[in-house]
Image (cartoon, helix red, strand yellow):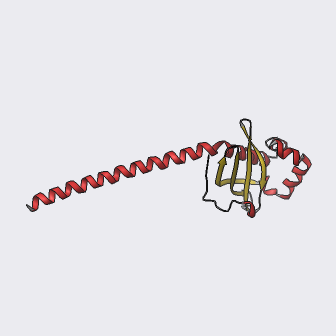
Amino acid sequence: MLNFLSSRGNAVLKIVLIGCGGLLVVVAIIVAITLFSVNKVTEPSVKAAEMFIDKLATGKNDAAYNLTSSEFQKVVNTTQFAQFLKAYPILADKESLSFSYKSVKNDKAILSGTITGNGKQKSPLTVFLVKEGSEWKVFAVSLKEEDVPKDTSDTSNE
């Protein structure tokens, strides 16, 4: 009788373990699909922001200015843009850039993270983008801590 209970207990344990393993696989698949979807939604805006910063870092300020939105260009002329760049030399001295916050809602994106200069100095960086036609354009750039989204855990995407 003890042998029967022992083998029945092993069978139940196997079923429970297989069920838990299957559930774990399903959860892993859902997480992977979610991460893939978030990346697909934010990837074009991230590439646009990176291209903008890369143009600045290589001294191609006119090309960077051309990556800004029409609304930005109505408010900020090339002389004002050059003055902004002088005030924030880390943009031209970029060693690395990472965005820890990415939010895309309809035709607007906010990317926030850290820019690191060649001298290892770091600064918060928030890039606001708008979609014009099929292209993401920079609408505003901030290196101020107060412009970093407060709830950086919200990477909501629509």
Residue at the far right: name it: 79
Q: Can you give x and y, in whole percent of width and height, for residue 137 in the image?
A: 76, 43
Q: Can you give x and y, in whole percent of width and height, for residue 134 in the image?
A: 71, 35
Q: Nearer the viewer, residue 92 or 18?
A: 18
Q: Nearer the viewer, residue 58 or 69?
A: 69
Residue at the far top: name it: 134
Q: Residue drawn at (61%, 52%), measured in percent from left and top? A: 156
Q: Can you give x and y, in whole percent of width and height, for residue 65 in the image?
A: 83, 44
Q: Nearer the viewer, residue 126 or 88?
A: 126
Q: Residue drawn at (74%, 47%), measured in percent from left and top? A: 129
Residue 73 located left or right of residue 137: right
Quarter of the figure that contains the N terminus: bottom left
Residue 21 located left or right of residue 32: left
Residue 21 located left or right of residue 48: left
The part of the image, by quadrant, that contains residue 63 is top right
Residue at the far left: name it: 1
Q: Residue drawn at (78%, 53%), measured in percent from left and top? A: 141
Q: Can you give x and y, in whole percent of width and height, for residue 89 in the image?
A: 82, 56
Q: Residue drawn at (20%, 54%), measured in percent from left and top? A: 11
Residue 3 located left or right of residue 49: left
Rendered position, 54 above or below 2: above
Q: How many marks?
A: 0
